[in-house]
Image (cartoon, coloured by chain):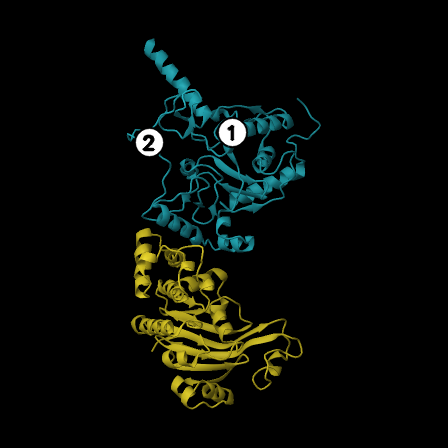
Amino acid sequence: MDKVLTVKNLSKVFGEGCPECFDLTGPEHDTNLCPRCGSIVAAHNVSFDLYQGEILGIMGESGSGKSTAVKCLYFDQPPSSGEAIFYDDGEQYDVFNLNAAQQRRLANHRFAMVYQNPHLGLNFDISAGGNIAERLLMSDVKNYAEIRSRAMRLLSRTEVQTERMDELPKNFSGGMQQRVQIAKALVTNPPLLFLDEVTTGLDLSVQAAILDLILEIQQQNKTAMIVVTHDLGVIRLLAGRTLVMKYGRVIESGLTDQVLEDPQHAYTQRLVASAL
Amino acid sequence: MSTSYPFGFLDEYAKKEIRRSTLKAVAIPGYQVPYSSREMPMGRGFGTGGLQLTLALIGKNETLKVIDQGSDDSVNAVNLRHFIEMTCEGINTTTKTEDADIVQSRHRIPEKPLREDQLLVLQVPYPDPLIVVEPSEDKRKMLHGEADYSRLLVKLYEDIVTFDEITISHRYPTRINDHYVIDPSPIPRWDVPKINQSKALILFGAGREKKIYAVPPHTKAEPLAFDDVPFRTEEFFDDHGQRRACRRCCCTSSYLDEFVDSTTGQKVYQCSDTDWCEQQMIQSIEIQKAGVA
């Protein structure tokens, strides 16, 4: 299988940071707030590999650093340290050492992100079709008819009524907004997709439909995905491999079945037990 | 008329700074160069940007034309011309485009094509085309730096979706030399193609926003559009598909103003560029004379 992404020792500290930040925080200290300097260690030494067509789950309670890790990879926040290599068409990109324009290019052409809150991923002042058009225009598609037809195709694939593509997303239900966001993310056929709590806050039947859609995309497009969630059901359904994070550290990782059926770390055991 | 002010009203340091910024603007086509924009004895927003450029660039024995909406006689043009005459001793003014060394303008580019030895100064209210899609100047600078104008194109897309055509009537975003997109000041779409490969240097001065930018001679200027929905200029056709003509000079190739005749109450059309209209009339009279003789 082709490797898509390698992440090594990714760390993110909010605040000034001190030499002892990493030693004084983490699950064994039961905090992510450094007692010396007051910085927050949101993520530390996160490492993993991701292969084509694979879905990697990142699980943990809120504040565990799972979203931060993904936001660093999508250039929403610069990491404090660490390395990430993106493999694409025989090329390798040292993701964090590219300049701003190159990073934006990757984010627009090769990566995509679906946020928990559609307000982050969509512009609510322009139509659903316009939102999808924006992403196509960012990746240099300059033909109006082509933009229309591709946006329409994606919307029908994500089961948004295409008659409503020229409406503002604020007129849509939460589930539909999320579908528009997924359509926008997928319109450039990205080989790497980040999903940050995509089903949180949606009702169960809509959740199921969106999870189905994600699996379908994985099967058809061979898109590699990183799914961030605190929902064990989502992890069980989607992810082949799972990382469990707590206080910014990866405390357990492995095949999803293994992690959920035979959790090794006390925190994971509690997490799994509380869900069942 | 003489005053105790230095030539060009501004002190030498101010003029030097404007010239330096202008050079930078010419060197980086379409880039908005910040400058200090001195206080002028008129409100910002009344053409102080263009005025400062003209004052810094004009020299003795040079000839100036000032127009507003194509007309030499409108209030703004008359006042600016008067002020420059007062403060720049030894310059000449004209209403004839072809006699001018510097043309300062608001809302129009003269119909008569400018030459290499001429200079066009445009007064600009809003220099940044991205202001409609991004309120933060920091972020706008980044977007300009990375030449990311997708959000402007989304605006065009939304226009086509809603109205079946691009509805921007003036300040049409135009890409200079394949990188920076400029706001070409409130000129109508009609004038945008004149910027492309213009023989004359075109300078833009925004006094209130404190920016100078330029389109150097023979530089590519491309209005933003889609491959299959091209940019187009205004059309002046009547109900029968006939190109409307100017009621004074009968010209059918100029940008027309529409207004209501105060005696008949009917809509009439007339060249917006008054000098152009004048020259067309003189020409047709000469042709008539030649025909009679």
Q: Say if A113 sits above or below A264 in the image.
A: above
Q: Relative to residue B98, is residue B212 drawn left or right?
A: right
The percent coordinates of residue A192 (x first, y second) are 39, 70
Residue A112: image location, x then y, percent: 41, 66
Q: Where is residue B122 in the image (x, y as percent from the top left)?
A: 52, 36
Looking at this view, is B220 or B223 the one in front? Answer: B223
The residue positioned 66% from the left and 75% from the top of the image is A37
Q: Provide the secondary structure element on which disc 2 rests.
A: loop
Q: Which of marks 1 and 2 is nearer the N terminus?
A: 1
Based on the displayed image, in which of its 4 quarters is residue A272 positioned?
bottom left
Instruction: Read off the residue under disc 1.
Output: B67
Amino acid type at mark 1: Ile
Q: Give the side of residue B83 with respect to residue B197, left or right.
A: right
The chain letter of the yellow chain reads A
Q: How crowded is mark 2: few (under 14 residues within 10 Å), some or many (20 or more)?
A: few
Viewport quadrant of the N terminus of chain A: bottom left
Chain letter of the cyan region: B
Badge 1 element: strand
User: Which quadrant would residue A134 be assigned to in this image?
Assistant: bottom left
Q: Residue B266's image quarter? A: top left
Q: Given contact means CB atoms under 8 Å apart, are the residues at marks 1 and 2 in contact?
A: no
Q: Do labels 1 and 2 share a chain?
A: yes
The numbered disc on residue B237 is 2
Q: Nearer the viewer, residue B89 or A269?
A: A269
In this picture, is A110 found above or below A272?
above
Q: Quick one: quadrant of the C terminus of chain A?
A: bottom left
The amino acid beneath tag 2 is: Phe
Name the subunit of mark 1: B
Q: Hey, which residue is sitting farthest right in the picture?
A: B4
Write the residue at 44% across / 21% down: B278
